[in-house]
Amino acid sequence: MICIGMLMLSGKWISFLSLVALLLLLFGIYKIRNGDIKKGYTFLAIGAILILLDNLILVVAISLISLGLFYGKSKKMHPNEGFIQKMSFMSNFDWDQSPWVMKSMSVWHVLGESDLDLSLGMPEERETIIVFQGVMGDMDLDIPDYYGVEIEAFVLFGSIDFDGKKDSGMMNRLTWKSANYMDTDYKVKVIVSYIVGDIDIRLI
């Protein structure tokens, strides 16, 4: 899938409309970095829509590359059998309303919204690995202090807010491990990767 996506990207897909869309994306990132969040995201949205209208092949190629990377990362992060693997165009996880069973899983979507409250999670194993990947995603993650938690988050375009400290713009990455990680009975590793995304992590 990665090879097919790269071959599709190598074609002649740059046009005047694509160039305008890229400039709007860059201007949107500039606005966000300078604190004008609302206008920044408006320009990002317009740029993304123009790219979608003018480059359907590009969108399909990016999706294939993302899906190929997802398969590779899933096998790497879940060496043992028994984990859940889900792929969908659009998904919604409301795991912040009532207790839920915490299982090792890998999820990929084109569009996704995920609300996870680990304080409501009931772990099935000593170490749980949760992987979320996709093209566009919005995640809210609440972390209690009685789990050992490790987080790896990456957003190409968008923002990562960690306990009130927000980084917006392009190529945002977060790596964090709780101080009690080695001492707790139950450990959770959360890996999130989106091309366009908004990740909000809160310590509770």
Image (cartoon, rainbow, N blue to C red):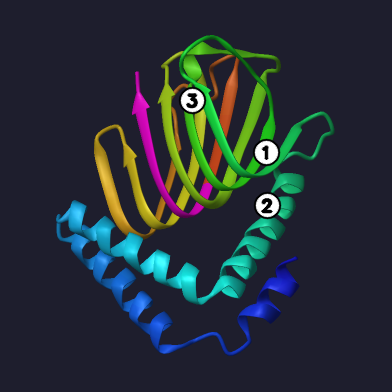
Query: Residue under circle 1?
Result: 106
Where are the magenta residues, as a range? 193-204
- Amino acid on which the number 3 mark rests in the picture: Leu
Instruction: Identify the disc placed on residue 116.
Output: 3
Query: Residue under circle 2?
Result: 70
Residue 113 located left or right of residue 159:
right
Residue 140 located within the stretch drawn in magenta: no
Q: Answer with mark 3 or mark 1, whichever residue precedes in sequence.
A: 1
Q: Quadrant of the N terminus?
A: bottom right
Q: Which of the 4 image quadrants contains residue 196?
A: bottom left
Are dots 2 and 1 in contact, CB under 8 Å? yes
- Amino acid on which the number 2 mark rests in the picture: Phe
Q: Which of the 4 image quadrants contains residue 127?
A: top right
Are dots 2 and 3 in contact, CB under 8 Å? no
> Between 62 and 142, which is closer to the camera in this rendering?
62
Q: Kindly identify the residue that appears in the image at 50 percent across and 19 percent down.
A: 118
Residue at the outermost right position: 81
Where does residue 77 sit, x and y in percent of width and height?
70, 42
